[in-house]
Image: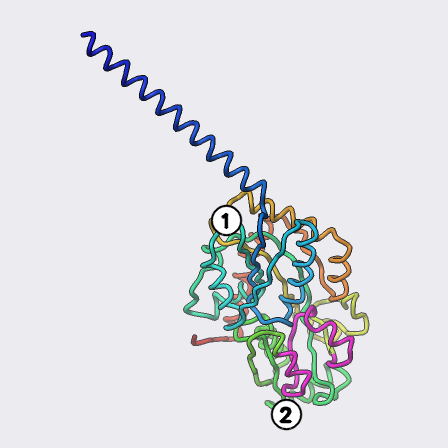
Amino acid sequence: MQDSWAKSVGLQRRTLLGSAGALLAAGASGWTGMAQASEWPSRPVNLIVPFPAGGGTDTFARPFSAQFAKTSGKTLVIDNRGGAGGTLGASIAAKAAPDGYNFFMGGTHHVIAPSVYPKLEYDLERDFIPLALLASVPQVVVVNPKKVTHASLQALVQDLRANPGKYNYASAGPGSSHHLAGELFKLQTKTQITHIPYKGAGPALQDLIAGNVDMLFDGLGSSAQHIKGGRIKALMVAGAKRNPAFPDVPSAAECGLADFTVTTWYGLWAPRGTPAAVQQQMLDEVRKIGAAEDIKAAWAKNGADYGQLSQPQFAAMVQSEIQRWAHVVKAANVKIDS
């Protein structure tokens, strides 16, 4: 009986010691996780930008990256991965390690993509966590002034109606917001313009400036400095009001297109599985960056607004935008085979 009692006590002692060890291990693990979160970022952070340098996303990613270095003390590396209307970079970002050192800067293109690309290698809602709205700019109709000499949008529309197919327009790629803006414009003006897709707004802008294409539907952010430099001409800015950065450019409503309200926006996502503590720390950095005078000046210069949405509000916006653009795609009968 004593042997039985001794064995029982020994078993209880081992169980208690095992439980204590487990608690200590869990505590150590918790402290390690907290330490890792508190030390973030301890090395450079990677930001995948799914378009080539010189486009709208890049226009905002570069100053954002520079300010991140000032506020966090670590580098935010811009990783340009252009192709397939921004979906190639999104696919790469979806497969990136969710370790708190990989983030994705997408936007309007990526809420359109599910409706136009039948075989995406990622799911925006399943594979990513929406974090923050970073910038929002209206679309603008810009032309090469040597190829399109009309002084107003109304005059251009008259020419387009009289000469179907006479002009072409560039976009940042099939299924991009530039593409959908062009198709929406064609629907509302009852005109025919040939679509020429590029691998990003940067290359499209360069060909517009060079005179290889006639016009472009672009986010104001990437076109702003070229408009100011006189290399391209803005005929209309989307929406009901003129943009404060370009007060001489008429709004769509003034041009008789009250329903042409196309906005290009850019947001920040994390690969799903990114630690919640790191997500919060990145959100804190986003707020600090938005409060910096350099960022306020850069955004204002490009006619943009810095995002003020909470994380849940941005997540709801992404869902709403996916549904909204699905209706536009259906109405415009936009189809992409690949």
Residue at which label 1 appears: 274
Horizontal and vertical percent position of residue 208: 66, 83
**What's the residue at 67%, 86% (across, down)?**
210
Q: Which residues are magenta?
A: 204-233
The quarter of the rendered structure image containing the C terminus is bottom left
Quarter-wise, where is residue 227 in the image? bottom right
Horizontal and vertical percent position of residue 318: 56, 57
The magenta stretch spans residue 211: yes
Indicate whether 290 appears above or below 115. above
Indicate whether 208 appears above or below 280. below
Quarter-wise, where is residue 6 in the image? top left
**What's the residue at 46%, 56% (across, down)?**
127
**Mark 2 against mark 1, which lies toward the viewer?**
1
Query: For this rendering, which residue is in front, 46 or 324?
Result: 46
Quarter-wise, where is residue 228 in the image? bottom right
Amino acid on which the number 1 mark rests in the picture: Thr
- Judged from this view, the residue extending furthest toward the right is 248
**What's the residue at 65%, 57% (across, down)?**
134
Mark with earlier residue (2, 1): 2
